[in-house]
Amino acid sequence: MSGFVAVLKRDLMLAYRRKSDLLNPLIFFLMVATLFPLGVSPEPQFLAEVAPGVVWVAALLATLLSMDGLFRSDYEDGTLEQMLLCPQPLFLTVMAKVLAHWMMTGLPLTLMAPLLGVMLFLPGEGMGGLMLSLLLGTPTLSLVGAIGAALTVGLRKGGVLISLLVLPLYIPVLIFGTGAVQAAVTGLPLVGFVALLGAMLVLGLVLAPFAISAALRISVSG
């Protein structure tokens, strides 16, 4: 696990040095919630109804915004090739990079979500469901997005292709995440939605690292 920890520390340090890459998803997340009432309707009742979907769509797009740079800098400076050649299992390196990405993107979005919920008049009953759904759903978004980032890392403009590749796979997470918040607001049980989000997260943790590793080998060798 020493290699895993070393890669994790390295990526966190690089993310801290590139503060613009760290702040851009958070600013985008905040801008969506701020501009949506201005473009649609400022009525509190309407905003309370659509708040779960707005917050989740904003979180999804903010995560997608940061995916293109997950492997890009390592590919450009040759670090990625060294990672492929080193004796440490590639899936551990990949997991460390995805975890660092989630800690710098998904976790801050989750912590900021209650603020956006208040701005959109989300009832207090839904705050717990919002936090829990994002806590389970954003790691899945990072894992799935990393597959698209690995497939397009060798392309100069892979951001659009990442969107085309991973957006269809994001839809189930979006549906169940929004459903969990709506269930919390209406007083219905969350167990079903939470179980489905947890199952998708476990499936992603088991399968995504190997898919990302294979995609990186194909992109670099190609």
Image: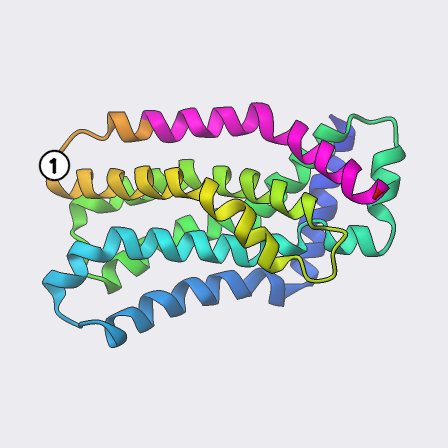
Vertically, is 175 above or below 63? above
Q: Is the stretch drawn in magenta largely helix, strand or loop?
A: helix
The colour scheme of the drawn protein is rainbow
Residue 71: percent from the left, percent from the top? 72, 49
Q: Does 68 sit left or right of 194 as displayed?
A: right
Badge 1 density bin: few <14, some 14–19, many ≥20, Cα 10 Å: few
**Front residue (pair 18, 52):** 52
Q: Report x, y in % for residue 196.
A: 35, 27
Q: Report the number of discs.
A: 1
Between 158 and 52, the residue placed more toward the observer is: 158
Tell me where residue 45 appears, x and y as whole percent.
Answer: 10, 61
User: Where on the picture, by quarter, is residue 85?
Assistant: top right
Q: Is residue 177 left or right of residue 157?
A: left
Is residue 166 shown above or below 48?
Answer: above
Residue matched to label 1: 187
Question: Which portion, as a residue range, is magenta?
Answer: 195-221
Q: Nearer the viewer, residue 195 or 149?
A: 149
Residue most extreme to the bottom? 38
Q: Is residue 72 magenta?
A: no
Q: Residue drawn at (67%, 41%), measured in percent from left and top? A: 97
- Residue at 78% of width from left, 25% of height from top? 89
Q: Residue at x 46, y 56 (%)?
A: 61
Residue 161: x and y, percent?
60, 54
Q: Quadrant of residue 191?
A: top left
The amino acid type, in three-letter code, at marker 1 is Gly
Relative horizontal placement of residue 63, taking residue 98 as reference (left or right): left
Tell me the element at label 1: loop
Query: Residue 206 occupies which quadrant of the picture?
Result: top right
Q: Quadrant of the N terminus?
A: top right
Q: Residue at x 83, y 44 (%)?
A: 222
